[in-house]
Amino acid sequence: MSTRVENRSVIVSVEGDLDIATAGDLRSAVQSAVDAHGPWLILDFSALDFMDSSGLNAIIHAYHLVRERGGSLALAAPNERVTKVIRLVGLHRQLPVHRTVAEAVAAMRALVVKQAG
């Protein structure tokens, strides 16, 4: 996992598998990123191969964390397999899912401006 900031959004990139072995790592990365850079969070799934229910729980935890701090969470660039999991549990109804990280950054920037204005 890696973290970067772009246009006031903090982007956490997740690679490989997001499962019981790595979900705690995502929770830690999200907590550190939000503490350091604010609650406008994008999870970059462009390099994520697989996600199970532990990964979904980590995403839900991230969602609650950013909402408590007045921010927002978006998911970016999930592959077809990960998208199926997201849709199966209805997470796409609660969180915006973007085809690319660039689309997610643009949408998040619009939210930040809207909330500030």
Image (spheres, rainbow, N blue to C red):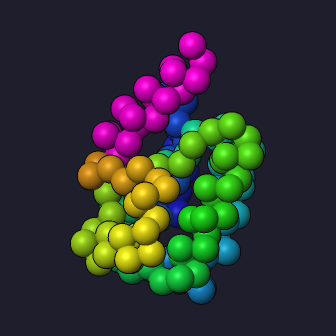
Numbered disc total: 0
Say whether residue 75 is visible: no
Residue 113 horizontal/vertical position (percent): 51, 20
In this view, 45 is above or below 37: below
Extent of the magenta region: 101-117
Foreground residue, 16 or 65? 65
Q: Quadrant of residue 83?
A: bottom left
Q: Residue furthest top?
A: 117
Residue 4 horizontal/vertical position (percent): 52, 44
Q: Residue at x 45, y 75 (%)?
A: 89
Q: Is residue 69 magenta?
A: no
Majority secondary structure of magenta residues: helix
Foreground residue, 30 or 94? 94
In this view, 70 is above or below 21: above
Residue 37 horizontal/vertical position (percent): 66, 38
Say whether residue 52 is visible: yes
In this view, 87 is above or below 92: below
